[in-house]
Amino acid sequence: MSDDSHELTAFRYPDGSLTYPGHPRGPGGQAHVDTVDLSEYTAEVITWTTSTATPPGVRQPNHLAIVEFDVDGEPVRALGQLEEGNVDLGDEVEAVYVEELRDPDTGIREPESQEWDGFRFRPVQE
Amino acid sequence: MTPFGNREGEWLRDLLAEAGADCLDDAGVNADSIDHLYVSNMASGELEGQTGAPNMLAHDLAAQPAYTARIDQTSSSGGAGIYAAWQSIASGASEMTLLAGGEKMTHKTTGEATDVIASLTHPVEYKHGVTLPSFAGLTARLYLDEYDAPRASLGKVAVKNHKNGVDNPKAQFRKEVDLETVLDSPIVADPLRLYDFCPITDGSAALLFCPESVAREMTDEYVVVSGVAGATDTHVVHERPDPTTMRGVVESSQQAYEMADRSPDDVDLAELHDMFTILEFLQFEDLGFAEKGEGWKAIEEGRTERDGDLPINTSGGLKSKGHPLGASGVAQAVELVEQLTGEAGKRQLEEPEVALACNVGGFGNCVTTTILETPEAGQ
């Protein structure tokens, strides 16, 4: 589900490949030439887990999945939280924006060093 | 090597000094002979607020003015330390190099220690609360589904490695577990359960490196580093085309085999980085011991047991011996040295000549593969 003010941004490189997240240099050492908002696409669950031993500031249990988007024939994967566990491999999911995925103030990482919002995945709702 | 486990009241400084002094005493080498001294360590600053460990150890062993450096490659810091120590000798920069790996962890809660380890992840992973155990759960589910492997096969890895650990006086857990206990233990990262994971551990291990000509004059009980190489895979785990293949293992082992002029068929035993049971299967395959998707059959057929044709983790592995991050890669090699020199006690195999260690950092993010041989193996 797309959110007008937030994007799940993948980088497109000169060879047509995509990565999420983007990197300063992609395949062949080339810089990206375009971006794609993956939240406008649905994705397929490649694998998932429910983690019960979570670090400080992380919801417990924490449902996680690796999903694969098909952007006009080009695959690109992302890892993210699932709204709920017990999905099946191959399920179709959509991205839902969340303002804070974990508490930035309780983990080891410097809160100012990165963003803490992002997208969770949930089965596509007909 | 120190005993691994909960070393209450002892900190990194104590553990490194204990392992380092034992190593020097065992070899009959004076500290003033050390040219280079390396400490493999992932997170002493984050875990106990102690930095500068190499200089600290050099002073505690009276090894000044030895050149010192810290080797940090997360969980593969020990393997990377072996590579650095070997390079120091091979380049001629040093004639005697001491490598000590160590970590102090048990004073932290499981959540705190897990967070320190998870800090190696990319920001887009970290913000979702990803941990190394959750990567293992994600990969195990995919592996079991893709290769039609039984869940119990993972449990049998834990059973085997706990059984091996019983005979290792330095192991954290010296207690057998049965398959039912493993499969009924609490879920940690579905489908993996408590006994699929290594513990949090304090400990240190050390090795001494020198040219073979020097070793030969000192003792008959030494081994040769015939192959060593390191490689990386993506930092962002989900960007790998096949999460069940660790490219760092494939690349580093191919280079190590080539350097040693060996193939997987030549290896008599191996220590693999079984931080999670699924990793034993992935490395077994990516090292060339089995075809892709067939690694789980080795445990079912008993091949990796101590009396099998390719014993894996005779030390008990990280699973049973424990996993003090920076020490683990060094401890893998300590086990292989003991096996190759006939000093492995109740764990001793029958005259092994070629042994391999695979030390994995992150979730396969960086890997070092080392091949050790008896001096007679190549003759």
Image (spheres, coloured by chain):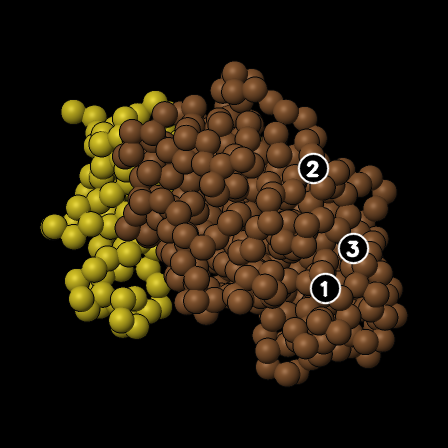
Chain colours: A yellow, B brown
Q: What residue is at 41 percent from the left and 36 percent from the top?
A: B298
Q: Are marks 3 and 2 on the same chain?
A: yes
Check disc 3 and report the residue beneath it.
Answer: B19
Quick one: label 2 or label 1, which is nearer the N terminus?
1
- Mark whose residue sits in front, 2 or 1: 1
- Mark whose residue sits in front, 3 or 1: 1
Check disc 1 and report the residue beneath it.
Answer: B220
Q: What residue is at 64 percent from the left and 70 percent from the top?
A: B85
Quick one: label 3 or label 2, which is nearer the N terminus?
3
Q: How far across and down, in percent of the image, does residue A18 sit?
A: 24, 57
Quick one: label 3 or label 1, which is nearer the N terminus?
3
Q: Chain of mark 1?
A: B
10 Å crowding of disc 2: few (<14), some (14-19), many (20+): few
Q: Is residue B64 left or right of residue B267?
A: right
Nearer to me, B28 or A2: B28
Q: Secondary structure at mark 1?
A: loop
State the separation of the CA atoms marked 3 and 1: 22 Å
Three-letter code for the amino acid on which mark 1 is drawn: Asp
Which residue is at the far left? A72
Q: Chain of mark 3?
A: B
Q: What residue is at 31 percent from the left and 44 percent from the top?
A: B292
Three-letter code for the amino acid on which mark 3 is drawn: Ala
Check disc 2 and report the residue beneath it.
Answer: B346
State the separation of the CA atoms marked 2 and 1: 22 Å
Three-letter code for the amino acid on which mark 2 is drawn: Lys
Q: Secondary structure at mark 3?
A: helix
Nearer to me, B237 or B279: B279
State the separation of the CA atoms marked 3 and 2: 22 Å
Q: Is residue A82 visible?
A: no
Q: Which mark is residue A7?
A: none
Q: Chain of mark 2?
A: B
